[in-house]
Image: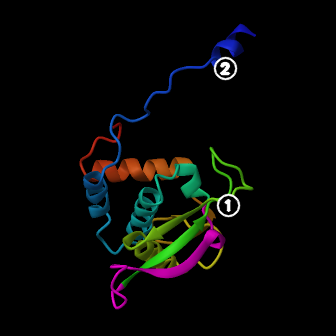
C-alpha cells in the first residue's frame, strides 16, 4: 500500500526531452527524407503532420485513420487579395486524446506543406481507408496494420541519427 501511495503522490512535472523541436531541427529531419523511397515519403508525412498539428503524441499519430481526415477549402495565401493562390487544407478529427474526451469535437487543421506530404504518402501507398501510417518491409510492401507508437519513436530517433542530431535530446 505504501509503494502504491508513493507512486500516486504528486511529483513535479519534468521535461522528457532536453530540447524542443524547432523549425531548424524539423528542417534537418525533413532533409533526411529527400529520396524517392516509400519509407521516406511516409516518414516525412509523419514528421510534418506531428509537428504542424500542434505536436501530436506518437500514440495519436500512430492510430490516425483515413476516416478521420476531411478535405477543407483552400486557405488564401493573402486573405486581403481575392486572386491570391490558396494553400491546401485538411482537418483531422482527433477523437480520444490523453487530455481530452472522445465526445469532444477536437479537430486540428493542417495547411500547406504538411497536407502535400500527407497526400503524397496516401497516393503513393494507395491508402484509401484504414490506418494512415503503416509498416513497410524492405521490398516496399505495405502492411495492413497501423504502426505502433514505439515504431513512430524509432522512426524519429533514426531520422535524428541520420540528421546528426542527438536522439536523446
Taking the image as shown, residue 117 lies to the left or right of residue 95, namely left
Q: Which residues are magenta?
A: 64-85
* Horizontal side of residue 102 vs 93, given as left or right: right
Residue 169 sits above or below residue 131 on the image: above
Could you tell me which secondary element the residue under label 1 belongs to?
Answer: loop
Q: Residue at x 41, y 76 (%)?
A: 116
Q: Earlier in the sequence, mark 1 or mark 2?
A: 2
Q: Quadrant of residue 4?
A: top right
Sort mark 1 into few (<14), some (14-19) or many (20+) by Cα contacts within 10 Å: few
Tag 1–tag 2 contact (CB < 8 Å)? no
Residue labelled with disc 1: 105
Instruction: Name the residue at the top extreme.
Output: 2
Tag of residue 90: none
- Residue nearest the observer in this picture, 75 or 34: 75
Residue that protrudes farthest toward the front in the picture:
80
Residue beneath disc 2: 8
Q: Is residue 139 visible?
A: no
Farthest residue toward the bottom?
83
Residue toward you, 97 or 43: 97
Q: Which quadrant would the C terminus be assigned to in this image?
A: top left
Position of residue 159 measured from the top left corner of the image (x, y, whole percent):
34, 53
Q: Which percent across, then down, holds residue 102?
A: 72, 54
In the rendered image, residue 76, in percent from the top left (x then y), is placed at 39, 81
Name the front one of labels 1 and 2: 1
Amino acid at each position: 500500500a505504501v509503494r502504491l501511495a508513493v507512486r500516486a503522490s504528486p511529483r513535479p512535472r519534468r521535461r522528457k526531452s532536453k530540447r524542443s523541436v524547432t523549425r531548424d531541427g524539423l528542417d534537418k529531419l525533413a532533409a533526411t527524407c529527400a529520396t524517392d523511397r516509400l519509407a521516406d515519403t511516409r516518414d516525412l508525412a509523419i514528421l510534418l503532420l506531428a509537428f504542424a498539428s500542434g505536436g501530436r503524441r506518437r500514440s495519436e499519430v500512430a492510430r490516425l485513420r483515413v476516416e478521420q481526415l476531411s478535405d477543407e477549402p483552400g486557405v488564401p495565401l493573402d486573405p486581403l487579395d481575392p486572386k491570391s493562390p490558396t494553400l491546401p487544407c485538411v482537418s483531422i478529427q482527433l477523437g480520444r486524446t490523453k487530455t481530452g474526451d472522445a465526445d469532444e469535437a477536437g479537430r486540428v487543421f493542417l495547411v500547406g506543406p504538411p497536407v502535400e506530404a500527407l497526400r503524397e504518402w496516401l497516393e503513393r501507398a494507395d491508402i484509401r481507408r484504414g490506418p494512415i501510417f503503416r509498416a513497410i518491409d524492405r521490398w516496399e510492401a505495405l502492411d495492413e496494420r497501423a504502426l505502433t507508437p514505439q515504431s513512430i519513436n524509432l522512426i524519429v530517433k533514426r531520422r535524428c541519427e541520420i540528421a546528426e542530431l542527438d536522439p536523446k535530446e
